Amino acid sequence: AQSVTQLDSQVPVFEEAPVELRCNYSSSVSVYLFWYVQYPNQGLQLLLKYLSGSTLVKGINGFEAEFNKSQTSFHLRKPSVHISDTAEYFCAVSERGGGFKTIFGAGTRLFVKA
Amino acid sequence: NAGVTQTPKFQVLKTGQSMTLQCAQDMNHNSMYWYRQDPGMGLRLIYYSASEGTTDKGEVPNGYNVSRLNKREFSLRLESAAPSQTSVYFCASSRDYEGDTQYFGPGTRLTVL
């Protein structure tokens, strides 16, 4: 069965600084990988996803993530954050051939300071 | 185009009471899901419906029942609420293939006293 570990529960960072949110997964088969963002008092929305092909995936709001199969990681990065990026970020994984089941990580709260 | 809607937004129940959370989507999606979100635990799948007329258990189904009323609507019922069911509940939908994006509703914040 697949699992997801988000290595940091909270990440404080100053505005305009770069940020990396870390995600590792475990699975015995090939996977699809996702990053979702949740702004306060809202539902989740997709930032980006990896299905196949290029391991560098670009998403909305200037975020990107790199799939590293050997390290079973899918870290999320942004070169310069804004106050408006303050939110909770969830990494998620689903297995190819595993149907509709998606496993979410515990979340990383990104707090951008002025 | 409203996407995924959920009612109610907030609810307070006493232990043992029952209630139904409603979810509807207008994107013609085949698959629908119910999750609960608890601090430090991310989202956990309660039940899902891969297509109209089918439902399956997720990770944490105990204490819940679901109904896929039609293609648009997927309800979650708590028959006898317990304090352990205090949580934020999210409904989501997706098209019918693997790797698809899930679209989430705004959530229902439920407190069981």
Image (spheres, coloured by chain):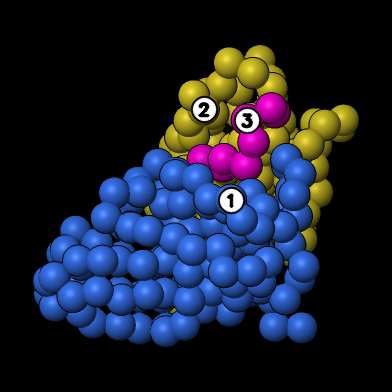
User: Which amino acid type is marked by label 3?
Assistant: Gly
Label 2 in the same subunit as label 1: no
Image quarter where the N terminus of chain B lies is bottom right
* Residue occupied by mark 3: A98
Task: Write the start and end of the magenta stretch as one range.
Answer: A96-103
Residue B56, position as x, y percentages in the image? 50, 45
Specify the quadrant of the image occupied by residue A83: bottom right
Q: Which residue is mark 2?
A: A2
Q: Is residue B30 above or below residue B60?
A: below
Question: How far across and how far down the image is residue B74, in percent?
Answer: 54, 67
Q: Nearer the viewer, mark 2 or mark 3?
A: 3
Give the residue drawn at x 26%, y 66%: B79
Q: Residue at x 68, y 66 (%)?
A: B71
Apparent side of residue B59 relative to residue A90 in the rendered image (left or right): left
| Chain letter belonging to callout 3 | A
Q: Tell me whether circle 2 and circle 3 mark residues in contact (CB < 8 Å).
A: yes
Q: Main secondary structure of the magenta part?
A: loop
> Is the residue at mark 1 from the same chain as the one at mark 3?
no
Q: Which chain is yellow?
A: A
Residue named by callout 1: B54
- Residue in front for this viewpoint, A8 or B96: B96
In the rendered image, the vertical position of residue A69 relative to residue A61, given as above or below:
above
Which color is chain B depicted in?
Answer: blue
Question: Could you tell me if the residues under marks 1 and 3 are in contact, i.e. CB atoms within 8 Å?
Answer: no
- Please indicate, yes or no, whether residue A85 appears anywhere in the rendered image: no
Which is more foreground, mark 1 or mark 3?
1
Disc 1 residue crowd, few under 14, some 14–19, many 20+, Cα 10 Å: few
Location of residue B64 by image quarter: bottom left
Q: Residue furthest right?
A: A53
User: CA separation, marks 2 and 3?
Assistant: 10 Å
